[in-house]
Image (cartoon, rainbow, N blue to C red):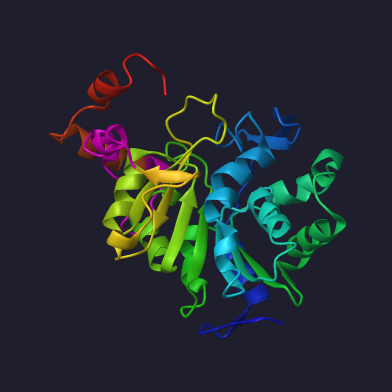
Amino acid sequence: MYLIPNSGMTLQDLNHRTTGVYNYSDTLSFFETKDGTISLRSSNFKELFHSLSGAKKESLEKYIYPSELHRFKKTKRLAVLDVCFGMGYNFSSLIEALRYEEIYLSWWGLEIDKTPLKISLKNSKYKSLWTNNILAILESIKNDNQFKNEYADCKLVWGDARKTINFLPKNIKFDLIYLDAFSPQQCPELWCEEFLNKLSDKLSKNGRLITYSRAAAVRASLKRAGLNVKTIFPQERMNKDWSIGTLGIKSKEKKNQEASNIFWSNLSKMEEDHLKSIAAIPYRDPTGDSSKLDIISRRTIEQSKSNLKSTSLWKRQWLHTKDY
């Protein structure tokens, strides 16, 4: 039985409390990506769980590689918060990357719906991606909401992440936070400035918040939260995309920070200018329980009153007619 510090509740009590108020339903369908891995389409969010280029490829390039896990060999400990667990790709890829490292993993996951994991673990193509050890861990998380052995302590809390983040142990700080929600247009609740502030507060010194989103609103909010914001590079040289994600580092010592490496770099002039357009106006959820429509409407009104550069003008100046 796992007791949540500072709450007086067990993990099972917490999951019962946080999931009982949701009647969450979605029609999900499988599709195969270009790297041969399986992903899902959501009818509720009208989006894919992963890019068409590859589900596992995306997890590696946008989350695992920018994490630079070798940094934790000295301390031999790693704390990770995984927001929007979904099918478990980021988690499983992390476990796989750590399999030969003597690094103890303390992992927390936040997810509103168990269905993606349940149906994935019944899919033979999905199961063929992972070792029996990883599959056993996923089964344990599905059935018991947790897994623990001498190498890892993993706990998943089901429910609205805006609420469940408040039940995480107050004394824990995360070296890595993966934010993998549906897009800001379809799931603005998890891209609001207030929620991003909470995530930033959960980072350890030099901790990294990593997300696939390159949205100006997200980056501007992370900057205001005190993070040093970087752009994540595509790993394929033929990929002409200007960014495949965002990395925010919690550090006040900017002079000593690396400006770039093979995975990320400082924002380009084009990306910095993006933050001066109305696209950078944040999503706002001051009460922590606003609906999607309320959040979108609030932002649209704020944009309409803004004197910032229009997004279309920014595109013409930097991207010409390219559809990004």
Residue 11 falls in image quadrant = bottom right
Tell me which segment is drawn in magenta. 267-293
Q: Is residue 139 above or below residue 144?
A: above
Q: How many marks?
A: 0
- Whether residue 118 sits left or right of residue 86 in the image: it is right
Residue 223 percent coordinates (x, y) = 29, 53
Residue 237 falls in image quadrant = top right
Residue at 85 percent of width and 44 percent of height: 128
Residue at 42 percent of width and 24 percent of height: 324
Residue 130 percent coordinates (x, y) = 80, 50
- Whether residue 234 sits left or right of residue 251 in the image: it is right
Residue at 70 percent of width and 59 percent of height: 95
Q: Residue furthest top?
A: 321
Q: Residue furthest left?
A: 307
Image quarter hosting the N terminus: bottom right
The reply to whether residue 265 is visible in this rendering is yes
Q: Is residue 110 magenta?
A: no
